[in-house]
């Protein structure tokens, strides 16, 4: 029996080696092959968080990411939508990358994949494959934002102007109403008319800006209506 022990030990060692080798072979056979989705995830992970803040920064950052993925042979789109709630769907507030290979995969602002289960809103939105159309939309949005701010400022200016005008009219009526025209009343009357002209000029600018804002809004809606939705 003393002579059999080494043989048994050798058999155990051989079996262990065969099991280990078999596991390695099985692992190689069952390992998931690299796909464009996994390649995209690796690329985005290497890039790290974009640091983009706000709709415009996110949009331009996504355009750069889309170009980079395209250089690696990966098809993707920039999606515009709302990631917290559906909100105003005609006015998307966020942009993100959607890899359109296989079943598709969204990537958030941190460039990490977001599954449909994690946030289904990332799989709803306007999917831009054409960079030029997206750039056109972004520039329209930037112009829209600028004009909206200018209108808000001008409306405040118009309110101040009309308030001053009302005070001037009341003062004129109190001091000169029903009296003969004098040098002082004529001067005050001219001041009132000058203020009226100033208020009218501000109002004309506001109306012009509103007309341009309406045109831009229609242009943006036309782009969105002709863009594929997820």
Image (tube, rainbow, N blue to C red):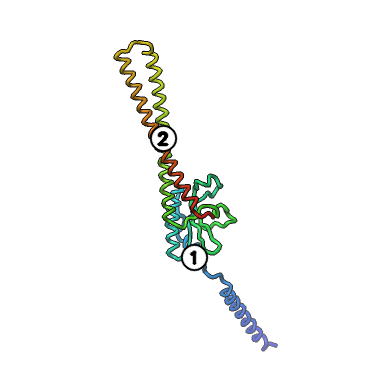
Viewer-closest of 173 and 17: 173
Left or right for 171, reference 121: left
**Mark 2, residues whose alpha carbon is within 10 Å: few (<14), some, or many (≥20)?**
few
Question: What secondary structure is found at the residue carrying circle 1?
Answer: helix
Q: Residue furthest right?
A: 1
The quadrant of the image that shows the N terminus is bottom right
Q: From what the image shows, is residue 188 above or below residue 46?
A: above
The number of discs equals 2
What residue is shown at x 39% (from left), y 23% (from top)? Answer: 165
Q: Is residue 159 above or below residue 186?
A: below
Q: In the rendered structure, which disc, 1 or 2, sits on the residue that comes first in sequence?
A: 1
Distance of mark 1 from mark 2, alpha carbons? 52 Å
Is 131 rendered above or below residue 208?
A: below
Q: Nearer the viewer, residue 120 or 137?
A: 137
Helix, strand or loop at label 2? It is helix
* Residue denoted by label 2: 207
**In the depicted structure, whether residue 34 falls above or below residue 205:** below
Quadrant where the C terminus is found in the figure? bottom right
Residue that mark 1 sits on: 39
Rendered location of residue 75, percent (x, y)? 48, 62
Task: Report if residue 139 is visible in the image.
Answer: yes
* Quarter assignment of residue 3: bottom right
């Amino acid at each position: 029996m003393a002579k059999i022990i080494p043989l048994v030990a050798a058999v155990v060692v051989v079996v262990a080696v065969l099991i280990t080798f078999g596991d390695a072979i099985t692992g190689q056979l069952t390992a998931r092959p690299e796909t464009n989705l996994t390649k995209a995830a690796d690329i985005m992970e290497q890039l790290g968080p974009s640091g983009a803040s706000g709709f415009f920064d996110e949009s331009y950052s996504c355009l750069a990411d889309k170009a980079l993925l395209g250089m690696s042979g990966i098809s993707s789109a920039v999606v515009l939508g709302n990631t917290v709630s559906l909100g105003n769907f005609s006015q998307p507030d966020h942009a993100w990358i959607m890899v359109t290979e296989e079943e598709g995969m969204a990537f958030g602002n941190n460039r990490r994949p977001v599954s449909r289960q994690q946030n289904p809103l990332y799989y709803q939105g306007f999917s831009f494959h054409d960079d030029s159309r997206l750039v056109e939309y972004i520039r329209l949005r930037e112009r829209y934002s600028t004009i909206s701010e200018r209108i808000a400022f001008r409306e405040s200016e118009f309110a101040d102007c009309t308030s001053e005008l009302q005070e001037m009219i009341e003062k004129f009526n109190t001091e000169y109403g029903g009296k003969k025209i004098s040098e002082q009343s004529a001067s005050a009357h001219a001041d009132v008319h000058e203020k009226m002209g100033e208020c009218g000029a501000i109002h004309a600018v506001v109306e012009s800006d509103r007309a341009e804002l309406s045109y831009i809004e229609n242009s943006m809606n036309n782009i969105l209506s002709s863009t594929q939705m997820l």
